[in-house]
Image (spheres, helix red, strand yellow):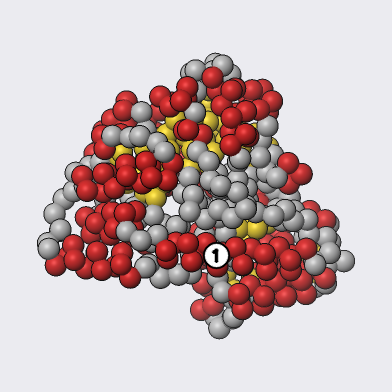
Amino acid sequence: MYISERLANVNESATLAMSQKSRELQAKGHDVINLSIGQPDFNTPDHIKEAAKKAIDENFSKYTPVPGLPVLREAICTKFKRDNQLDFNPSQIVVSNGAKQSIANIILSLVGPGDEVIIPAPYWVSYIEIVNLAQAGNVVVEAGIDQDFKITPEQLEAAITPKTKVFLFSSPSNPTGSLYTRDELRALADVFVKNPHVVIVSDEIYELITFDGKHESIAQFEELRDRVVIVNGVSKGYAMTGWRIGYIAAPQWIADACNKLQGQYTSGACSISQMASAEALTGTQEPSEMMKETFLRRRDLVVKMAREIEGMKVNVPQGAFYLFPEVDSYFGKSFDGYDIKDANDLAMYLLETAFVATVSGEAFGSPKCLRFSYATSDEQLVEALKRIKTALDKLK
């Protein structure tokens, strides 16, 4: 018995694997602080939950159209006009079971064997594996902490070949929190203008969690409008991770392709979740603003404490809720039977001795780093950073 070659080329999600290890230690009675998962620690706002209850009472319990309920697709178009000054028709919107499915739809619709997808590193763990699932080639462009984890136009231009079909990136970024400015996006856009065969996929799921800079979309540049796909959803900005609603806004031909693909393997997303999401996008945005203020305070707290740990190199994230410190100064050190050869060893050392769950940067294409999520309480963050400092100070 054997699994398909397609699946054999796909690795397990490192973030989900670390969360599972954390739960196993918790089940044994250990006090584990989990900084490994990208999930807001807030409850879904009440007005959104009320919209879901109303939908249940009004029997919104039937199959939904494959690309989404009309009311939600209209709400998404309204959001793009209001927040991004972008005009889309509802036919250009495809609603899916989370932004991860949205990305999978796009990649599986556009690429196959022999094609290349350019992905800046650090990258979200699933980007590489979704491209592997499509049996296409990943072309990774590395950007280190000294350039704030953002690639340059020169790096992009050097990576593009006649085989390049897609450029896939996120801003604000998971795992780094880095945010591309308008000028930086303009410079990348100039490269794409010279390479009309490349489709740009812009993952903007953390749009509502930006701090010192304004969120900018590469779709704002008119000359690229016919080949930019925006990916977004309600999970992060509205604390709706379990509702499983993501969406794309795309050129019509790509939206049609994703609609066709989704129609054969999941059909439409949950009807109740869609009605709740329509309210999230069109109702009051005050809860999201309050969440952003909390994340900003936590960012400042975590950056301050991390900078006090000798050997940890830290930048200042401009969005999302992650810190991505460079930790290779600890490689080659040891303590009490733990030999730290790489970030994987370091993450396991912190989990098993300090009972703090992080994620190795290797999973994100940056093996010198660790990812911390600060989507938990201030008290938990303070305790976690104290434990991490104590554990790292023991390494010699």
Camera-nearest residue between 11 and 16 = 16
Rendering quarter of residue 120: top right
As drawn, the residue found furthest toward the right would be 396
In the image, what residue type sits under mark 1? Glu
Q: Is residue 157 above or below residue 142?
A: above
Looking at this view, is 132 or 235 the one in front? 235
What is the tally of numbered marks visible in this picture? 1
Give the quarter of the figure containing the C terminus: bottom right
Q: Residues within 10 Å of mark 1 (few under 14, many from 20)?
A: some
Label 1 secondary element: helix
Give the labeled residue for mark 1: 293
Q: Give the residue displayed 67% in from the left and 77% down from the top.
A: 383
Regarding residue 6, the answer to whether it shows in the image is no
- Residue 300 pos. (x, y %): 67, 64
Res. 333 in view: yes
- Residue at point 63% right, 72% down? 381
Q: Nearer the viewer, residue 170 or 211?
A: 211
State the quadrant of the N terminus.
top left
- Across and down, in percent, residue 137 comes to 54, 29
* x and y, in percent, of residue 386 in the image: 72, 75
The answer to whether residue 57 is above or below residue 68 is below
Q: Residue at 82%, 70% (x, y): give it.
A: 393
Instruction: Name the residue: 73% across, 41% down.
Output: 147
Q: Quadrant of residue 307?
A: bottom right
Residue furthest toward the bottom? 29
Image coordinates of residue 103 in percent, x first then y, are 42, 41
